[in-house]
Image (spheres, grey):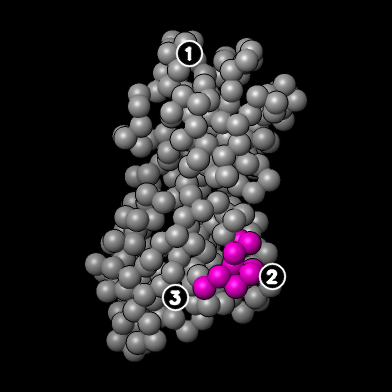
Amino acid sequence: MTGRVAIFLLGLAATAAAADSLAVAVASNFRLPAEEIAAQFRRDTGFEARLSTASTGKHYAQIVNGAPFDVFLAADSKHTGLLAEAHPDLAATRRTYAIGSLVLWSRATEFAGGGCRGALDAMGNRRIAMANPDIAPYGAAARQFLVKAGLWAAIEPRAVFGENVAQAMHFVATGNAQLGLVARSQALDPRLPAASCSWPVPAGLHEPILQQAILLPHGRGNAAAVAFVEYLGSAAARDIIGRFGYGTPE
């Protein structure tokens, strides 16, 4: 933890007793690192972060309809931008906490040795899983890649859309789809079955996946919520984020 963050958190603990917990809406792809960050955050500050995971689009809809979340960890910058516009006094709390990347992944033995990327050009009747591009940022990035590759028209009818990228990974990990466009962080999960192939999608083939956080109106005056947003930039949080396969901003 940086000295600045440590002093900030100690000051909050000493002077603010408005709340000792917060509710965090977390993008589904970030569940595992968020759990580790929350545990370390509690050890370092005494505050408890209660996590709820879902697609970014679903959480955004809940938030604008009054769901009592204090902090939003989105999988993109679009939805935090909309919230910042709606609540200008909270715009300064908006920050990029992780930079995501996309991977083409499979456990299908038929692709062993041949590579995932080549399989895209010869899909046949095979199915590909991805998050719903209309509500999930990783799904939007997957569609952007397939459009740039000139494959979207052919692949869309064979696509299996998950509500979020976690569900998309479930489809491909269980064999209900032969290929999946998923988050790199998911592909690193040791609990998954062994991959037959994995291909990192070049970052230039889709818009940057800047995962951003923002303090929400319900979190105003909540010391725990303010501390959690600040903590995302600490050395402890950045180390956890990096271990799960994400980039972090300079």
The residue indicated by pointer 2 is 85
Residue 248: image location, x then y, percent: 45, 51
Query: Can I make out residue 204 in this image?
Result: no
Q: Disc 2 residue type?
A: Glu
Chain part drawn in magenta:
60-68
Outermost residue toward the left in this view: 43
Say if mark 3 contacts mark 1, CB within 8 Å: no
**Callout 3, which amino acid?**
Val
Residue occupying image coordinates x 43% and y 13%: 109
Q: Which residue is mark 3?
A: 226
* Callout 1 secondary element: helix
Quadrant of the rendered image containing residue 82 = bottom right
Placement of 132 over or under 98, stated as above or below = above
Label disc, if present, on residue 111 of the rendered structure? 1
* Relative height, residue 206 to residue 220 (above, below): above
Front tag of 3 and 1: 1
Q: Amino acid at mark 1?
A: Phe
Residue 221 among magenta residues: no
* Residue 52 image position (x, y, % from top left): 45, 60
Q: Say few, some or many: other residues with alpha carbon within 10 Å of mark 1 (under 14 / 14 to 19 / 20 or more).
A: some
Instruction: List x then y, in percent, for residue 108.
Output: 45, 17
Looking at the image, which is closer to me, 163 or 41? 163
Q: Is disc 3 surrounded by few (<14), some (14 to 19) or many (20+) residues within 10 Å?
A: many
Indicate whether residue 65 is drawn in magenta. yes
